Amino acid sequence: MSSALDRLKNLTNQISSYELARKENMKLLEKLFISLNIGEKVESFENLFDFKAINLSGASLVQETLGEVKEGRYLQILAISYDKEAVIKSKNISLGYFGRAETVEVGLKDSIVEFVVRYRLEKSFMTLVHYNAIVNDLAKE
């Protein structure tokens, strides 16, 4: 009995820590949204999540080489919109162009990388919530 109770406590603590991490992530993501002037291309912070995905050109998002500049490339935040009714279904939209990657100030580059990673973390939480709702609907049937 104690073992089951311990597992439940651990699970509750883990869920609670994820929720705290998510709230903190959203606060920091919104600050980056403002400081990187993404609002010039996206009407509001909430609309940021209408995009299917956000990618980065000019710097690595791979964990082992995170933030490493790709020589000769341009540092740019790219959003992918998707319209299933359109002839061309997906479209890349530049949310921020920062020039040649190797000439961008390190602090700015790091903020750009952090923005994309934090966006992807929140998008992952949203996907989790979405599929959890689907599974719950299946369980009701």
Image (spheres, rainbow, N blue to C red):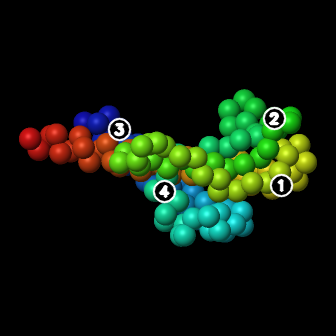
Residue denoted by label 1: 107
Closer to the camera in the image, 135 or 19: 135
Q: Are marks 1 and 3 in contact (CB under 8 Å)?
A: no
Residue at horizontal 73 percent and vertical 36 percent from the top: 60
Q: How many marks?
A: 4
Residue 28 seen anywhere in this rendered image of the structure: no
Q: Amino acid at mark 2?
A: Lys
- 10 Å neighbourhood of mark 4: few (<14), some, or many (≥20)? some
Disc ID at residue 49: 4
Instruction: Compare residues 62 and 70 and report the one nearer the observer.
Output: 70
Q: State which mark lies toward you, 4 or 1.
A: 4
Q: CA distance from mark 4 to mark 2?
A: 27 Å
Q: Which residue is mark 2?
A: 70
Q: Earlier in the sequence, mark 1 or mark 3?
A: 3
Sequence-first disc among 4 and 1? 4
For mark 1, give the secondary structure. Answer: helix
Disc on the earlier residue, 4 or 2? 4
Which of discs 4 and 3 lies nearer the camera? The answer is 4
User: Amino acid type of disc 4?
Assistant: Phe
Q: Which residue is mark 3?
A: 7
Q: Secondary structure at mark 2?
A: loop
Q: Position of residue 61 (x, y in %)?
A: 68, 37
Residue 136 at what x, y percent from top left? 21, 44
